[in-house]
Amino acid sequence: MSDTAATEAPRTGENALPKGYEPADVEARWIRHWEENKTFTPDPAEVLSGAKQPFSIVIPPPNVTGALHMGHALDLTLQDILCRFMRQQGRSVLWVPGTDHAGIATQNVVERQLKKEGKKRDDLGREKFVERVWEWKKEYGDRILNQIRSLGASVDWDSLRFTMDEGLSKAVREVFVRLYDEGLIYKGNYIVNWCNRCHTALADDEVEHAPKKGKLWRIRYKLAGAPLPDGRTELVVATTRPETLLGDVAVAVHPEDDRYKDAVGRKVILPLVGKELPVIADSYVDREFGTGCLKITPAHDMNDWALSRKHDLPVITVIDDKGFMNENAPEPYRGMASLVCRERIVADLDAAGLLVDVTDHDHSVGECYRCKSVIEPHVSEQWFVKVGPLAKAARAAVPSLTQIFPPQWEKTYYEWLDNIRDWCISRQIWWGHRIPAWTCQNCGEMIVRVEDPDKCPKCGGPLKQEDDVLDTWFSSALWPFSTMGWPGDKEHPAAKLRAYYPTSVLVTGFDILFFWVARMMMMGLHFMGEAPFKHVYLHALVRDEQGKKMSKSTGNVIDPLVMTKKYGTDAMRFTLTSFAAMGRDIKLSEKRIEGYRHFVNKIWNSARFALMNLPGEPELTLHEAMENSSLANRWILHRLEEVKDEVERAAFEYRFNDIAQSLYRFIWSEFCDWFVEMAKADLSGDNACAKEGTRRVLLTVLSETMALLHPVMPFITQEIWSVLPGIADRELALAPFPARRPECRDEAAARDMAFFQGIVTGVRAIRTELTIDPAKKLPLIIDTADGPAGGLAVLTANEHLIRSLARIDSTDIGPGKTGPRASGTAVVDGARVFVPLKGVVDFGAEVARLDKELGKLDKQLNATSAKLSAPGFAGHAPADIVAAEKEKLAGLKDARGKLAELQERLKAALAEG
RNA sequence: GGGCGGAUAGCUCAGCUGGAAGAGCAUCGGCCUUACAAGCCGGAGGUCACAGGUUCGAGCCCUGUUCCGCCUACCA
């Protein structure tokens, strides 16, 4: 055991808590404590023995080069709430932390570092470069992990994983080899998305489409041979990329386009090149767009590529993998950067009289999701996963095996899987899992193996391994089982895997539904025979207060680390939780976090107040305390039971905002505003029995509230918990969810309290609205004749509280009591309230105030009686609804009548002067 | 082009299976009432985007419309 706060002698009682809550100090202390004590490291044996139900989550591994942003903070907060809540529910909780190696991003970072030294990666060579990346990882790779720590995430640090770890790399190889052997991985020459800057292929979903202002050039392609029957001698094509015409292999028109029917089958002459191209017909061509004539450049356009395969056209690459015109381009253009070439081509066309015109044209352009440079379609040798069969299984698993929350994302998930194309998994970089395939330099045999082969098994010739590495998402797709020890020993799978796979829920942003979630589904189902998670909870994106995506370039980023430092982690977590309603974006502003910091302060101060009154454990048990207990005590215990239900239900249903709201209201508006104020009388009174009873209730409610709030605000709750007297287990994180106490349910107390609050609020309203000096104590008369059943008893028993809460110095309560005509008045639940005000205020104001009240009552009266008298209501509506409406109408009529009468009395008094 | 979501108080949003419109912040008025001025008490503020429909009854269900987001797509 370590010397942390929980193991020190608890500082309970008076002065246990300093005046102000200092989050930084408290947080650091508990983070250290949890980690040193391995509080969140579960034992798989407790699951395997059947002693506990498992609950597991794998963290969405952040990019190892990344820094924590608000999206992470939200994601981690929600996961932490679930994990901490499930521990309270008695589950064996495993939350696996880790990072991914982010192939392209990390390589970029290190290359930039090298550049500063005036070096390129080729100067180092592959091996040295990869070593260099590992060095970088060693030095900076823990940054984001420490940031996760600082949020209080209750992950099991013993389970920490990195996608390039030995075990995870083994999983990657195993999966690759098996998919290859099953014919689900193949290598081939295809057109792919190519990033010139990162110098690698990208998968379809790694390309982001952004609208761009472009131009549309219309270019004449002269017909070879005789003019068309109508005398035309050329076709005009429209293109946004004139430089690609050097790679044109055909011109296509729509087969039913009357304008071009006669041209089909003829040849045109490619401008600036001079070679003849066929004119083909294909219904893909949109007659409405441009001129209806489409030039076909298979090597540099995805759609043209597809057409070229259909029509068996050649593929001519004219732009190389760095974005320069290659040897297939005519001499004058060779070696030019493609954009430079574009200008030259346009100029040359113009000079040759082949350019019709140029118009502005907005279209969407693909960009690299890592570096934002324009994506070039590029033909090259790549490795692909044949996703069809995998996607089919992944689709079928939702919602039967895996449920998505909120469910509207199901459709998006289906949509993507239904239209999925083969997944390009090879990347032309060095940092990552190198493809485990070797080619025999002798016989050309391809060997794909888990273990490195040393020679060709067929001819014994020397082998050369593939240069490419795998897409980072390929390894991320295995995360739910690779992190738990798969494949390991196949006969005896890891205990962790047996205990915690499949995971309970995946919590992540909807933006990586495709990148990651769908692929994990594919891999999990294929290799484990089980979906990797039972639930997927997709939360919204965190945006700025205008609803814009936060980005460094816009400068609207709210840094979670700055916020936690400034307002405390609990305040930020609570803010995010409050706004985490399902299916909605979160518009965050610093002001909101600041607002919830006030709530943290409120909690702290209420605990300080409680501790001041709890020098030691109360002498009465709760059971004893409840005998002849006060209204306040019975009511708050009753409400506590209801809050337990609300919080528990909301947590199971991922209604995070409801957890927050329910606790906020209970703590602030009920516990602090009413219970504590009412308890003060007992706590400072002479009645030892009442005092001890109320102390017991105060302690019970405070401690259980800390437990309920703990998943959302782990630090302040643990800090307070650790100084409460009479708590056996100082580790709140491992304490069970507060047990239900059916005997504390007390509807009568709820009703009585509502009446009591009505009286107090009624008097306060009279006071404030008539601007009576708050210090001025007033007399109070209440006629309980028509009040609720037991109302008199409630008011009599709590008379001293009415005095203190409403600033009353004398009361006269009973059936038939009447105050002077010159009174401020109210009707509460049938009871008439009088606050004699002769000589205190101007009664004209009170007459006006009553007018306003009467107006409100009239509005409600009209609505209710209209409803009741509406044809069919009594016949069709359920009996209980009708009865309730009738009762309501009676109550309103009664209140209105009484109030009107009271106003008349007042007016009469006024007339008399 | 297809899909999804949103439109409720000045702002940000709740409102679960249809049964008297809610919260926070902001605002106005009054209070340093010894846990808390990061606080307390009270007030004001809404034709629930628009138009129809179903129903005894609609913020909620159905149809259409208008705006605003996002995702997706082969219009060069």
Image: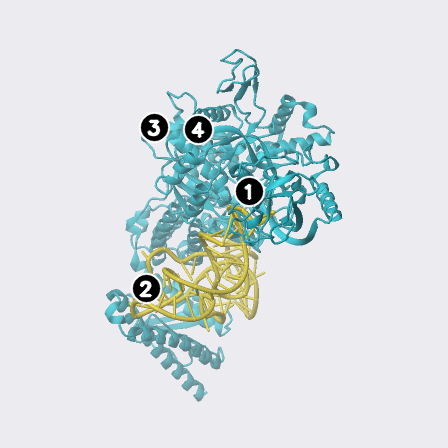
Chain colours: A cyan, B yellow
Say whether mark 3 and mark 1 are on the same chain.
Answer: yes
Instruction: Name the residue at 34% across, 46% down.
Output: A620
What amino acid is at disc 3?
Leu
Say whether mark 4 and mark 2 are on the same chain.
Answer: yes
Q: Position of residue A382 (x, y in %)?
A: 55, 30
- Pointer 1 residue: A303
Q: Find numbered disc 3 in the image and state the secondary structure of the residue it sits on.
A: helix
- Pointer 3 residue: A48
Foreground mark, 3 or 2, reads 3
Mark 1 or mark 3, earlier in chain: 3
Q: Position of residue A304 (x, y in %)?
A: 57, 41
What amino acid is at disc 4?
Met
What amino acid is at disc 1?
Asn
Residue A440, compared with residue A478, is above or below; it is above
Give the CA separation, mark 3 to mark 2. 55 Å
Q: Find numbered disc 2 in the image and state the secondary structure of the residue it sits on.
A: helix
Q: Find numbered disc 4 in the image and state the secondary structure of the residue it sits on.
A: loop
Residue A183, compared with residue A791, is above or below; it is above
Mark 4 or mark 3, earlier in chain: 3
Residue A851, compared with residue A334, is above or below; it is below
Foreground mark, 1 or 3, reads 1
Mark 4 or mark 1, earlier in chain: 1
Count residues near mark 4 (Cα–Cα under 10 Å), then give few for <14, some for 14-19, many for 20+. Answer: many
- Pointer 2 residue: A794
Mark 3 or mark 2, earlier in chain: 3
Please give the chain letter of the residue carrying mark 4: A
Mark 2 or mark 4, earlier in chain: 4
Say whether mark 2 and mark 1 are on the same chain.
Answer: yes
Foreground mark, 4 or 1, reads 1
Q: Residue furthest top?
A: A460
Please give the chain letter of the residue carrying mark 3: A
- Pointer 4 residue: A484
